[in-house]
Image: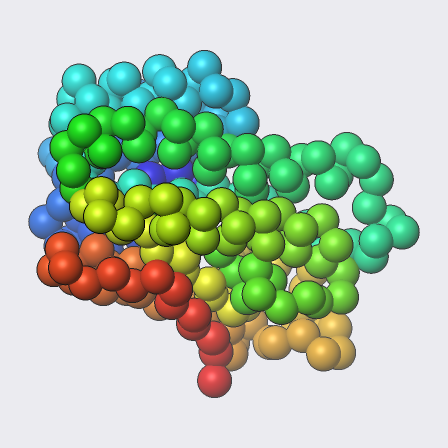
Amino acid sequence: MTGASRGIGAAVADVLLGEGATVVRLARSLADGSEGRRHDLTCDVTDPGQVVRAADRVQATVGTPDVVVNNAGSFLLAPFEATDLAAFDNQLNIGVRGPFFVLQAFLPAMRAAGRGLVVTIGSIADHVGLPGNAAYGAAKFAVRGLHEALVAESRGSGIRFTLVSPGATDTAAWDPVDPDRRPGFTPRARMLRPTDVADAVAFVATRPPHVHVDWLRLGPV
Protein backbone atom coordinates (compact mmCIF):
# COMPACT_ATOMS: atom_id res chain seq x y z
CA MET A 1 0.00 0.00 0.00
CA THR A 2 1.16 3.52 -0.79
CA GLY A 3 1.51 6.53 1.47
CA ALA A 4 1.88 4.09 4.37
CA SER A 5 4.31 5.90 6.65
CA ARG A 6 1.78 8.01 8.56
CA GLY A 7 -1.85 9.01 8.96
CA ILE A 8 -4.47 6.91 7.21
CA GLY A 9 -1.88 4.80 5.39
CA ALA A 10 -0.06 3.79 8.56
CA ALA A 11 -3.38 2.99 10.24
CA VAL A 12 -4.51 0.82 7.32
CA ALA A 13 -1.22 -1.08 7.40
CA ASP A 14 -1.55 -1.72 11.13
CA VAL A 15 -5.16 -2.88 10.90
CA LEU A 16 -4.42 -5.24 8.00
CA LEU A 17 -1.45 -6.64 9.91
CA GLY A 18 -3.82 -7.24 12.79
CA GLU A 19 -6.09 -9.16 10.41
CA GLY A 20 -3.20 -11.49 9.67
CA ALA A 21 -2.15 -10.04 6.32
CA THR A 22 1.39 -9.70 5.03
CA VAL A 23 1.72 -5.97 4.36
CA VAL A 24 4.13 -4.12 2.10
CA ARG A 25 4.29 -0.41 2.93
CA LEU A 26 5.44 2.02 0.26
CA ALA A 27 6.36 5.64 1.01
CA ARG A 28 9.03 8.17 0.17
CA SER A 29 10.06 8.43 3.82
CA LEU A 30 10.40 4.70 4.51
CA ALA A 31 13.68 2.82 4.34
CA ASP A 32 13.80 -0.63 2.77
CA GLY A 33 13.47 -3.29 5.45
CA SER A 34 11.35 -6.09 6.89
CA GLU A 35 10.02 -7.06 10.28
CA GLY A 36 7.84 -10.15 10.50
CA ARG A 37 4.93 -9.81 8.07
CA ARG A 38 5.64 -6.13 7.43
CA HIS A 39 7.91 -5.12 4.56
CA ASP A 40 8.87 -1.50 3.85
CA LEU A 41 10.03 -0.10 0.53
CA THR A 42 11.14 3.40 -0.36
CA CYS A 43 8.94 4.58 -3.20
CA ASP A 44 7.89 7.94 -4.62
CA VAL A 45 4.69 7.11 -6.51
CA THR A 46 5.19 10.08 -8.84
CA ASP A 47 8.31 8.36 -10.23
CA PRO A 48 7.26 5.48 -12.51
CA GLY A 49 10.72 3.93 -12.30
CA GLN A 50 10.50 3.70 -8.52
CA VAL A 51 7.00 2.24 -8.76
CA VAL A 52 8.15 -0.47 -11.19
CA ARG A 53 11.08 -1.28 -8.89
CA ALA A 54 8.71 -1.58 -5.93
CA ALA A 55 6.29 -3.79 -7.86
CA ASP A 56 9.15 -6.08 -8.89
CA ARG A 57 10.31 -6.30 -5.26
CA VAL A 58 6.79 -7.08 -4.05
CA GLN A 59 6.42 -9.82 -6.66
CA ALA A 60 9.76 -11.33 -5.66
CA THR A 61 9.14 -11.04 -1.91
CA VAL A 62 5.46 -11.90 -1.38
CA GLY A 63 4.09 -12.64 -4.86
CA THR A 64 1.07 -11.13 -6.59
CA PRO A 65 -0.82 -8.98 -4.08
CA ASP A 66 -4.35 -9.83 -3.04
CA VAL A 67 -5.02 -6.20 -2.10
CA VAL A 68 -3.49 -2.97 -3.41
CA VAL A 69 -4.31 0.21 -1.47
CA ASN A 70 -3.73 3.49 -3.30
CA ASN A 71 -3.50 5.95 -0.41
CA ALA A 72 -0.64 8.34 -1.21
CA GLY A 73 -1.89 11.88 -1.49
CA SER A 74 -1.35 15.50 -0.61
CA PHE A 75 -3.86 17.93 0.89
CA LEU A 76 -3.94 21.49 -0.37
CA LEU A 77 -6.46 24.01 0.95
CA ALA A 78 -6.27 27.22 -1.07
CA PRO A 79 -8.60 29.46 -3.09
CA PHE A 80 -8.41 29.10 -6.85
CA GLU A 81 -6.73 32.50 -7.27
CA ALA A 82 -4.03 31.52 -4.78
CA THR A 83 -3.28 28.17 -6.49
CA ASP A 84 -0.35 28.43 -8.88
CA LEU A 85 0.46 25.92 -11.60
CA ALA A 86 3.15 24.19 -9.56
CA ALA A 87 0.75 23.56 -6.69
CA PHE A 88 -1.94 22.33 -9.08
CA ASP A 89 0.49 19.99 -10.84
CA ASN A 90 1.69 18.63 -7.50
CA GLN A 91 -1.86 17.65 -6.55
CA LEU A 92 -2.37 15.87 -9.86
CA ASN A 93 1.05 14.19 -9.77
CA ILE A 94 0.54 12.67 -6.34
CA GLY A 95 -3.23 12.21 -6.42
CA VAL A 96 -3.79 10.96 -9.99
CA ARG A 97 -0.56 10.08 -11.79
CA GLY A 98 0.72 8.21 -8.72
CA PRO A 99 -2.27 5.84 -8.52
CA PHE A 100 -2.13 5.43 -12.31
CA PHE A 101 1.54 4.34 -12.14
CA VAL A 102 0.79 1.95 -9.26
CA LEU A 103 -2.07 0.35 -11.16
CA GLN A 104 0.02 0.00 -14.31
CA ALA A 105 2.69 -1.78 -12.29
CA PHE A 106 0.47 -4.16 -10.30
CA LEU A 107 -2.65 -4.84 -12.38
CA PRO A 108 -1.09 -7.09 -15.07
CA ALA A 109 -0.07 -9.73 -12.49
CA MET A 110 -3.44 -9.45 -10.76
CA ARG A 111 -5.25 -9.89 -14.07
CA ALA A 112 -3.11 -12.92 -14.86
CA ALA A 113 -4.01 -14.39 -11.47
CA GLY A 114 -7.69 -13.59 -12.02
CA ARG A 115 -8.17 -12.15 -8.55
CA GLY A 116 -7.48 -9.18 -6.33
CA LEU A 117 -8.84 -5.99 -4.82
CA VAL A 118 -7.79 -2.39 -5.44
CA VAL A 119 -8.82 0.12 -2.79
CA THR A 120 -8.47 3.80 -3.59
CA ILE A 121 -8.58 6.24 -0.69
CA GLY A 122 -10.51 9.21 -1.98
CA SER A 123 -12.26 11.96 -0.04
CA ILE A 124 -15.62 13.62 0.35
CA ALA A 125 -14.06 15.99 -2.20
CA ASP A 126 -14.25 13.29 -4.88
CA HIS A 127 -18.03 13.79 -5.05
CA VAL A 128 -18.66 17.26 -3.59
CA GLY A 129 -17.20 20.60 -4.63
CA LEU A 130 -15.84 22.48 -1.63
CA PRO A 131 -14.39 25.99 -1.29
CA GLY A 132 -10.61 26.05 -1.22
CA ASN A 133 -10.43 22.68 -2.98
CA ALA A 134 -9.82 23.72 -6.60
CA ALA A 135 -6.64 21.64 -6.96
CA TYR A 136 -7.32 18.99 -4.32
CA GLY A 137 -10.87 18.45 -5.53
CA ALA A 138 -9.76 18.26 -9.16
CA ALA A 139 -7.32 15.48 -8.23
CA LYS A 140 -9.91 13.58 -6.19
CA PHE A 141 -12.58 13.83 -8.89
CA ALA A 142 -10.00 12.61 -11.43
CA VAL A 143 -8.95 9.57 -9.39
CA ARG A 144 -12.61 8.76 -8.88
CA GLY A 145 -12.97 8.78 -12.68
CA LEU A 146 -10.02 6.39 -12.95
CA HIS A 147 -11.66 4.12 -10.38
CA GLU A 148 -15.01 4.09 -12.18
CA ALA A 149 -13.42 3.36 -15.56
CA LEU A 150 -11.54 0.40 -14.09
CA VAL A 151 -14.72 -0.93 -12.47
CA ALA A 152 -16.36 -0.90 -15.90
CA GLU A 153 -13.36 -2.41 -17.69
CA SER A 154 -12.75 -5.17 -15.15
CA ARG A 155 -16.15 -6.80 -14.79
CA GLY A 156 -15.73 -10.57 -14.97
CA SER A 157 -11.96 -10.39 -14.46
CA GLY A 158 -12.01 -11.41 -10.80
CA ILE A 159 -10.54 -8.04 -9.77
CA ARG A 160 -12.65 -5.73 -7.62
CA PHE A 161 -12.23 -1.98 -7.16
CA THR A 162 -13.42 0.03 -4.17
CA LEU A 163 -13.35 3.79 -3.64
CA VAL A 164 -13.32 4.74 0.05
CA SER A 165 -14.31 8.40 0.48
CA PRO A 166 -13.81 9.68 4.02
CA GLY A 167 -14.84 13.06 5.32
CA ALA A 168 -12.53 15.17 7.47
CA THR A 169 -10.04 12.87 9.18
CA ASP A 170 -7.75 13.98 11.99
CA THR A 171 -4.25 13.66 10.58
CA ALA A 172 -1.20 15.91 10.47
CA ALA A 173 -2.47 17.30 7.15
CA TRP A 174 -4.71 19.61 9.19
CA ASP A 175 -1.87 21.05 11.31
CA PRO A 176 -1.22 24.10 9.09
CA VAL A 177 -4.96 24.72 8.68
CA ASP A 178 -5.90 24.75 12.38
CA PRO A 179 -9.59 23.94 11.75
CA ASP A 180 -10.53 24.50 15.41
CA ARG A 181 -9.99 28.23 14.88
CA ARG A 182 -11.68 28.52 11.47
CA PRO A 183 -15.44 29.02 11.21
CA GLY A 184 -17.22 26.43 9.09
CA PHE A 185 -14.59 23.71 9.60
CA THR A 186 -15.16 20.49 11.51
CA PRO A 187 -13.29 20.65 14.84
CA ARG A 188 -10.59 18.02 15.12
CA ALA A 189 -12.29 16.40 18.10
CA ARG A 190 -15.28 15.61 15.86
CA MET A 191 -13.29 14.39 12.86
CA LEU A 192 -12.90 10.77 11.84
CA ARG A 193 -9.81 9.00 13.14
CA PRO A 194 -7.37 7.27 10.78
CA THR A 195 -8.39 3.96 12.36
CA ASP A 196 -12.00 4.60 11.27
CA VAL A 197 -10.87 4.69 7.65
CA ALA A 198 -8.57 1.72 8.22
CA ASP A 199 -11.44 -0.33 9.63
CA ALA A 200 -13.46 0.48 6.51
CA VAL A 201 -10.63 -0.76 4.30
CA ALA A 202 -10.37 -3.95 6.36
CA PHE A 203 -14.13 -4.47 6.01
CA VAL A 204 -13.88 -4.26 2.23
CA ALA A 205 -10.77 -6.44 2.10
CA THR A 206 -12.44 -9.21 4.11
CA ARG A 207 -15.60 -9.51 2.00
CA PRO A 208 -15.88 -12.79 0.10
CA PRO A 209 -14.75 -12.68 -3.55
CA HIS A 210 -18.31 -12.55 -4.92
CA VAL A 211 -19.04 -9.29 -3.03
CA HIS A 212 -18.10 -6.03 -4.75
CA VAL A 213 -18.17 -2.85 -2.67
CA ASP A 214 -17.90 -0.16 -5.34
CA TRP A 215 -18.03 2.94 -3.13
CA LEU A 216 -17.88 3.43 0.63
CA ARG A 217 -18.45 6.91 2.02
CA LEU A 218 -17.58 7.76 5.63
CA GLY A 219 -18.22 10.93 7.56
CA PRO A 220 -18.13 12.34 11.08
CA VAL A 221 -21.47 12.67 12.84
Q: Is residue 62 left or right of residue 57?
A: left
Using the image as rendered, state which of residue 13 and residue 140 is in the foreground: 140
Q: Residue at x 14, y 45 (%)?
A: 21
Does 220 sit above or below residue 97? below
Residue occupying the far bottom of the picture: 221
Describe residue 157's horizontal placement relative to residue 177 as left or right. Answer: left
Nearest to the observer: residue 151 or residue 161:
151
| Quarter of the figure with the N terminus | top left
Question: What residue sits 37% from the left and 18% below the top?
Answer: 52
Q: Quadrant of residue 157?
A: top left
Q: How is the image coloured?
A: rainbow
Q: Position of residue 57 (x, y in %)?
A: 25, 18
Asked if residue 125 is positioned above or below residue 61 in the image, the reply reads below
Tell me if 26 is positioned left or right of 220 in this view. left
Image coords of residue 54 (percent x, y)? 33, 21
Residue at 65% across, 41% down: 91
Tell me residue 25's x, y (percent).
31, 35
Q: Quadrant of residue 130?
A: bottom right
Q: Is residue 14 visible?
A: no
Q: Nearer the viewer, residue 207 or 187?
A: 207
Rendering coords of residue 203 (x, y %)? 23, 64
Total labels: the figure holds 0
Q: Is residue 129 visible?
A: yes
Q: Residue at x 23, y 33 (%)?
A: 111
